[in-house]
Amino acid sequence: MDDTPRPPESRETVPTREADLEGGPGTVERIGGSDSHTTGRREGTDDPDRILVLDAHKNASLVFGRALEGQNVEITSGGWSRMSPGMLSRHATDRFLYSSPYRKPERFVAELTGFLRANDYFAVVPMSDLTHVLLSKHKTKLEQTGTAVGVEDWETFVTANDKRSLARLLEDLGVPGPHTHAPESTDDVDASKDEFTYPVLIKPRFTTVLTDDGTYTEARISEKNYVHSPDQLVRRYGSLVETYDYFQREPPIVQEVLSGAVTATCGLAADGEFVDYFQEERLRMYPVDGGSSSLRQGIHEPEMAEHARKIVAALEWTGPIYIEFIGSDDGTFTVLEVNGRYWGSVGCAICGGVNVPLLHYQQLKGAQLTPKPGYETGRKQRRLFYTDLRWLNAQLEAGNYRAVDPFVRSFFDSDHDVLAADDPLPTLGAILWAIRETVRSEGPVQTPKEPDRSPASRSTDRFGGEN
């Protein structure tokens, strides 16, 4: 059997639901001026580079625009709602409204290609896992518009983001990873069920998967993914594969559950070498027993950096990359997963002195990269909306009223990824986006309910690292 890692199959079916975006497909607006939009190729060497930054609802999209302040660039914020924080930022010159890539992926790609073909953009940069998938898959087509596409080539991207492929790579490199089995069937699970120390996690191979109706969804985890005995593993594995069509195409892996501090080495690479990197540790998370970080800080761990360098070199990676680890009490680090894309806590790296968006922009221009030596450790960065608010709520529900003190102190001793006195409107956007998500679904369309963690568990909230 061919062992080459493959993503979910490509589907070209467009869902029958009507347009999911405000203003119609492919709508572009000039912010703070005329509604007209400059088309055609710019002339003159002093004109700013125009960059289309996708996924305006993601904090990383907002952070990207802020990180390029002072550069000769114009940022167009792309998304499917004007309520998105990135579209309300003072750093965005234009808005580009497109169809939801989750619900209408083919239409999204067509709108994006047409927009880039008709307008002069230096680069397009995605921020979510799904838009990275779609832009990488269609990179050649998009580059034909004359636009630089800020993603890795498809084959390399799949290799980095496939959890089964990663387990094999770690074994080849001699880099510590959790005990992992990649079964081909339920019978295969039954044959290997006694090899594990329980509990174990039934884990999707890919963060974003294609469903049978042609839409995309994020393969979230819940209490159903955690099993505590060999017989339960066989039953639960079979049940999940029967329930979710994407598991039938790409059988999930089985992986031991680890405990410890959640850390990461992240940064920008070029041809298999880090141009610059940053390391972080999660101080607070939601869900509290293993989820996305609500408070993190810079750290320095040479062993973790060496593991990350080996992975980047083996992948021959170019572009942003986030490698997640579990740090044990004995000072060792185990790789959990690799995300070959921008990550939700990229602002922490920027606060620490590693400006990944700026380095990425310079890389796309073919400039000589000159990162600053070292970075600041101990500096904290917070995601208030809504991860830290949910963390506080969980603490109060558990009767831990002392959590109010560190929560309040974080307003004074931590940087924030959305809150900014000189760019206040994205905070309103974060609130409006949360209301929108409560009222209607514009993202994943086939997901289990919100994760309800086992106390012994530790894994990423969406199998996507820092979203």
Image (tube, grey):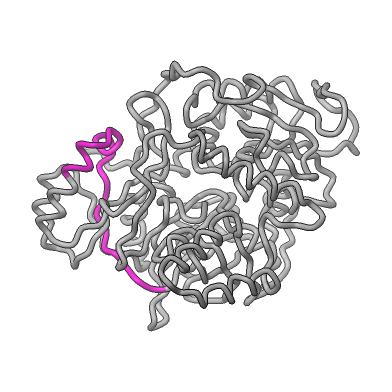
Residue 263 screen position, x and y as percent = 48, 68
Q: Say which residue appears at 14% left-offset and 50% top-offset.
A: 189
User: Camera-side residue: 396 or 274?
Assistant: 396
122 on left or right of 340 = right
Which image quadrant is residue 121 in?
Answer: top right
Residue 150 visible in the picture:
no
Q: Please name whichever residue, 71 or 82, is drawn nearer the observer in this view of the structure.
A: 82
> What residue is rendered at 77% in x and 51% in y?
424
Residue 387 visible to an observer of this rendering = yes
Residue 261 point in image, percent of width and height: 43, 73
Was residue 226 drawn as part of the magenta stretch in this picture? no
Residue 156 vs 303, above or below: the answer is: above
Q: Give the range drawn in magenta.
A: 238-260
Q: Position of residue 293 (x, y in %)?
A: 51, 62
Vertical position of residue 142 compared to residue 186: above or below: above
Q: Does the magenta stretch include residue 248?
A: yes
In the image, residue 178 sits, relative to residue 2, either above or below, namely: below
Question: Which is nearer the eye, 103 or 385?
Answer: 385
Image-based side of 107 in relation to 148, left or right: left
The percent coordinates of residue 230 (x first, y second) are 12, 59
Give residue 141's quadrant in the image.
top right
User: Residue placed at 39% from the left, 48% from the top?
Assistant: 450
**In the figure, is residue 195 to the left or right of 459?**
left
